[in-house]
Amino acid sequence: MPRRRVNDNLFKELTWDDLNEWAGSRIVSRGKNYQRQGRVSELATTDGGGLIAWVEGSERYATKVDVDRDRLPESICTCPYEYDCKHGVAVILEYLERVEDNKRIPRARMDDERLQLLENADKDDGADDEDSFRSEAIEGDIHAFLEDKTRAQLIELILELAEHYPEMGQGLADRRQVISGNTKSVVTRLRRDIRKISEDPGWQDNWHGNGYTPDYSAIRNKFETLLAAGCADEVLILGEELITVGTRQVEESHDEGETAMEIATCMPVIVKALDQSSLALTDKLAWAVDVVLKDEFDLLDAFAEYLMRQHKKQDWSLLADQLLDRLKVSQSATASGTFDRNYDRDCLSNWIIHALEQSGRTDEIIPLCEVEAHKTGSYLRLVERLTADQRIGDAERWIQKGIGATKEKWPGIAASLRKKLCEIRVAQENWPMVAAIHAEEFVRLPSLQIYTDCRKATRKVKAWPKVRGCLLVYLESGMPPWKQKGWPLPETGLDAPDLERKNRFPMVDDLIDIAVFEKKPDQVLHWYDQRPKQRYDLYEPGEDEIAAAIQDHAPERAIAMWKKLAENLIDQVKPRAYEAAAGYLRKAGKVMVQQKSEEEWDRYLQGIREKHARKRRLMQILDNLDGKPILKKRL
């Protein structure tokens, strides 16, 4: 059967728009960096008309890419993301570069190791990564190869491999030390490695396509070696140190979370060490709670999962008592209003509640929540507990009490309590009261979301036209809806909105949002022209949405808005700003083409090129605005 050629035409026709639509601009940007850094190796074409390669990330990943007739690629990879990842983008860009440079690209063999890895990963989606990516066929080949070797030949082979792969050699030496019972030197070396790798923060320079992400795979492997040798206590001690220095490293890093992801891969091993350690079970639970309470960067989710497992009731009960004792000496900040301190106390009490639930001491939970509500303002948690227990009357009384206690110091808590009361009224199908609560919230803080919520509830009682008119009058003049003639909704009994605020009427931005939502382009322009002009004529919020709303009604105004947005971004001299500017220019160009103004559009782009000719990255982005393929050279 003849082999299919790679989908040459389809890959060569890909544009940057195609890649952005497929993977998203952020993933495309990361894929560009990977390709520029030379991370793609052993690129080959497949019998199915696709591409396959190794891509170096935190590990070595096999990646395969195909493209369909709609010019949208699809990829599968042995990385944790599996599908349509940055590694797939890097493979496509590497292929196009090699084609442009007239470099030969070989055909992958049918027994290519990467194809088997990807087939296993696809079949066993959701299984452990190591098991998913293991190829039984390859293992069989290795086993057959080694079976014929003598002991001396095997030693020679291992020494040769250790010379080429120093980490493998060190791993073997560590295993020997552990087996012989001399774990001290291994632990000392591993502690030194942890401190060394955590010294430098991770970083990414998207402008130059380079960066640094610390690789914790060797640390993880050494943890597993120690754990397999029964050294759980040692791993736990080292794990605690890794959590401390790793948290500091993540705090200092600027790499969009890459360092945090690397460190987080070590946590499941430390959880296993905790589970196998010599600590009493209650102390294990307390250890996990302690680290989770210190987690600022979502590094320690594995420990939260450990705490969600089933453990003995008596151990949960002992933990609850320990944490309750700690809560007694913890300080709340009711007087000073310090949010962080109350947040820490609330997190601690949440784990107490979880421990009480697991131990069967549920009758202690609501009394605890009542005490803590007074101390930290955690009224919402109490109300949710009361509501879940169907104690609706008590919940409503605590809502009123909580609003009174928090509306000045913590208005966000008061707003959440009012929202909770609205949910209760929805469950009761008391639609006039639901609409009235939404109307009051709209006066407190107008937003399109509250406007649509009010519309939904008011339509159920056929009062929306009148309520809508009153809400718009409020935005235009500042007169509260319930003071207007013919207001159809009841009083809520809640704290009245503060009408002494120095709001500026008409509230133009909110009126614009509503006009956009209601598809009234004439009103959009009416209120847009009444906006106070921004100093220095810079970006005005919502202009992109406004331009989209009026593009059919007043295309020339929409084009002007998009041009201004793009030009302001270009003046920032940042690659990301150029990408965003291209999006606005693309919209402006589309409307100009629809208006039969192609020549004017070409002249405008040429003017930008001449003005910013020295901005190389911008020139590359402008090349993509015409929808031409990434591959510029015709072969």
Image (cartoon, rainbow, N blue to C red):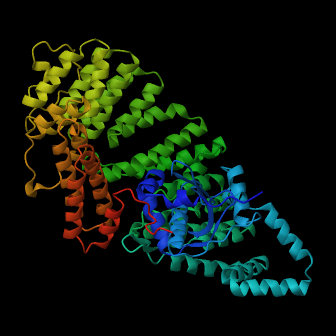
* Nearest the eye: 338 or 320: 338
Number of callouts in the render?
Answer: 0
Which residue is rendered at x = 78% and y = 57% of the image? 1
Question: Is 552 placed left or right of 275 in the picture?
Answer: left
**496 lies above or below 75:** above
Q: Quadrant of residue 384?
A: top left
| Residue at x-position 33% and y-position 42% | 375
Place residue 398 in its image quadrant: top left
> Is there any visible trace of residue 284 in the rendered image?
yes
Residue 563 in the image: above or below residue 575: above
Question: Measured from the top left, where is residue 530 in percent x and y?
Answer: 7, 39
Q: Residue at x 12, y 27 (%)?
A: 474
State left or right for residue 454 relative to residue 499: right
| Nearest the eye: 494 or 99 | 99
Residue 138, x across and y down, in percent: 79, 66
Q: Position of residue 508 (x, y in %)?
A: 13, 37
Q: Nearer the viewer, residue 566 or 634?
A: 634
